[in-house]
Amino acid sequence: MSESTTMSEKPTIIHHLEYNARRQGARPAIHDKVTGTWRTRNWREYNLATRRFAKALMATGFGEGDPLAILGANRPEWTISALGAIRVGGISAGIYTTCSAEEIGFILDHSEAGIIVLETLEQLDRVFEIWDSVPTLQGAVLMEGAGSHDDERVVTWDEFIASGEGVSDEDLDARLDSLRPDQVADFIYTSGTTGPPKAVMLTHENLEWTASTIGGTVDLDTEEVALSYLPLSHIAEQTASMLMHLVFGYQVYFCHNGLELAEYLPEVRPTTFFGVPRVWERFESGIKGKLAEATGAKAKIAEQAMNVSAQFIALQNAGKTPPKLLEIQYQAADKVVLSKIKAAIGLDRCRVLVSGAAPIPAASLEFFSSIGMAVTELYGQSEGSGPTSTNLVGANKYGTVGRAIPGVEVKIADDGEIMVSGKNIFAGYYKNEAETEAVLTDGWLHSGDLGSLDSDGYLSIIGRKKDIIITSGGKNIAPQNIEELLAGIDIVGTPIVVGEQQRFLVALLTLDPEAAARFAEEHGIDASSMHDDPVVRSHIEEAITRDVNPQMARVEHIRNFVVLPNEFTTATGELTPTLKVKRNVVNDKYADEIAAAYEAGQVL
């Protein structure tokens, strides 16, 4: 644990924030570019901003257990609001910016939030649509730069902060002193892949213990630099850019628009980076495209450098010390080739590279190892405060999600379900005792995932229990491993395997935009109609026959497939805000295409 935990017998993340304000008050804490140019706040200023916001909450009568709803992109006001609420015994309740008015209304009504913090007037319009149906909602606070509104229930950021000036420091600090480890501090609303979202209740102990533990596994310290770009309503981003940030006292840069990640990375050059598989896959596609442009001697040098890097990192992953000659060769390869590739995407300083929130193909991890990037895969869920297990540099086994983090116990139930126990396990679902009782038994969390443990304690994920496909022949098939292989096909974006109560399996495939564009150019075909092009279909057929089906049991073979004309997105409804596929939505939306594939019969 960080030394800051010695300041109290019951530390919270707020205690860490106060400690950092005293220990390194003048050092930079957070940076943002919301105004177009970088702004920096040091630890003293950051702490003071949360105190002022907390006082303003107290002035409204905000009390213990009261939720504060927050809707906005990654920026200081988001975390200042959340920390202000948590500081005075309240609960932070984040809402994804992609949520519709109806979805916002559900969360506001379910959480019984009295105040919502908003980033834009457009978001406020969505709230106005449902305000009258949410009896608890009393007011809205607009973040800096959002402008103002003549509705008396809406105040600007500055007006809200000014309203707390009459609250004393003594009264504020008394709230901090009264916080309890088992007190709920955070609502994480699940992504809702199968129905209305549930509110995961995380306690002060959940947040502080988990952040301290997972950060300790990779030896984080005050010198780290992180980039916050994934939605802060997700536990993974909260852990990286709010919780561990406070516990270990490092700098965080806010990327206000996640679509601009590629522009921010070379500016920030983080030392620690968390990405979901879609982010890593975009990196991979872009890098491969650039490498494909190299010819002659340059191509040969790049190939040799990548071979050396793959060998070097493979030994490191296995916990072995590479031979001296290989180390020298790796250093040369890094200087001539690898460092330039990493610098081009802004990850040349990064020593902690993590993938999580969804499975990533082992082939992708192997590719990154060939360019000098030892990406480690982490597994967890909101109900476990984020991480359950993780691979580490020096103990990194591709195809697994690593070993349980210290203090967490993992076991496999008789039916293959992954069970988890530890101080990271949530307090239950808010207002949902039935669901809580269904997943919590004697302190053990029923994860809903199927998995296995090898003799070294490494956990492998087989798939979600609810995603199991039962064919008409009664065979139970987990689609995840098949989908991982399909995702390894060069031009495939997102694959979904279907086959419930059918004689064979069919795959729905989207195309990766960058890889598909290159393929179209190389083969002289129209990029806008690739999903119907026979050259594309032939290419995918060959890849499935060669690289996918031979690795699976016969009953798991893909016998036909559909190439869809568009990507899955949150805007079109196939993805959750955390970029998980809504299988039920996909099955319904493309029912005609699925039916046509089955009518066509087996072609593979």
Image (cartoon, grey):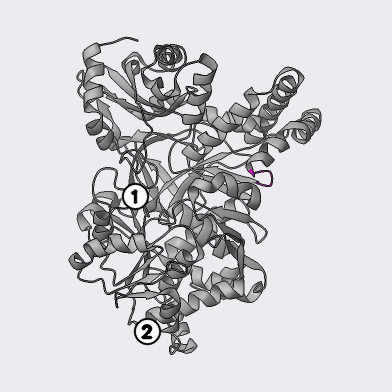
Residues under labels 1 and 2: Cα distance? 39 Å
Q: In this view, does 583 lie above or below 210?
A: above
Circle 1 SS class: strand
Name the residue nearer the viewer: 466 or 2: 466
Q: Does the magenta stretch include residue 348?
A: yes
Q: Give the range drawn in magenta.
A: 346-350
Please give the name of the residue rendered at 25% of the width and 29% of the height, measured from the top-left corner: 590
Task: Identify residue type, mark 1.
Answer: Leu
Residue 387 place in picture, x, y as percent: 46, 49
For residue 445, which numbered disc appears in the image?
Answer: 1
Label 1 or label 2, whichever lies nearer to me, is 2
Q: Where is the C terminus found, in terms of image quarters?
A: top left
Picture quadrant of residue 531:
top left
Name the residue nearer the viewer: 219 or 340: 340
Q: Is residue 94 above or below residue 401?
A: below
Please give the name of the residue rendered at 34% of the width and 76% of the height, measured from the top-left corner: 64
Please give the name of the residue rendered at 43% of the width and 74% of the height, measured from the top-left corner: 157
Picture quadrant of residue 97:
bottom left
Q: How many labels does the image show?
A: 2
On the image, numbered disc 2 is attached to which residue?
59
